Amino acid sequence: MEVKSTTKFVRLSPKKARDVAREIQGLPVSSALDILTFTPKKAAQLIGKTLKTAIADAENNFSLDVGTLMIKEAVIGSAPTQRRFKPRAKGSAGPILRRSSHISITLVGSTPEKKKKGARKAAAVPTEESPAVAPAVAETPA
């Protein structure tokens, strides 16, 4: 089951927010919240709010266990840019781009799957034909 939460029109540049979002991808929700709590960036606070919203949605709307939730992806997209101008020398103007972003977080809840009958991992049990440890090769003196 996938749960998606989005925060739109966040007044933060996508480039700055992506650095924080990359740190939490693929982590369990509890570790991601710890990382975001102790990261001293504005993006960490905003991504944390979006993550808490996704957790609440998963728990209340989809009845998923919070302990099994993982972050599948944390995507930061660009939102509309506000364009302003600052006066410069000799009557010219310099552009100011105030960038904003959309934060989207997807959580995956692992549900207990039924194992197929007779399915075993072959690599877990070594057989005589394929030993678990390769034999050492003896070197011959030259």
Image (spheres, rainbow, N blue to C red):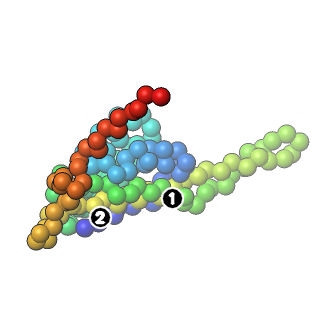
Which residue is tagged 2? 3
Quadrant where the image shows the N terminus: bottom left
Residue lying farthest to the front in this orientation: 142
For residue 137, what is the image quadrant? Answer: top left
Residue 58 placement (x, y as % from top left)? 23, 61
Amino acid identity at mark 2: Val
Under tag 1, what secondary structure? strand
Q: Residue at x 18, y 55 (%)?
A: 127
Q: Earlier in the sequence, mark 2 or mark 1?
A: 2
Residue 83 locus on image (x, y percent): 67, 55
Crowdedness near tag 1: few (<14), some (14–19) or many (≥20) residues, C-alpha within 10 Å: some
| Residue occupying the far left of the picture | 117
Query: Helix, strand or loop at disc 2?
Result: strand
Which of these two is toward me, 53 or 114? 114
11 relative position to 28: left or right:
right
Residue 64 seen anywhere in this rendered image of the structure? no
Image location (x, y in percent) of residue 95: 73, 49
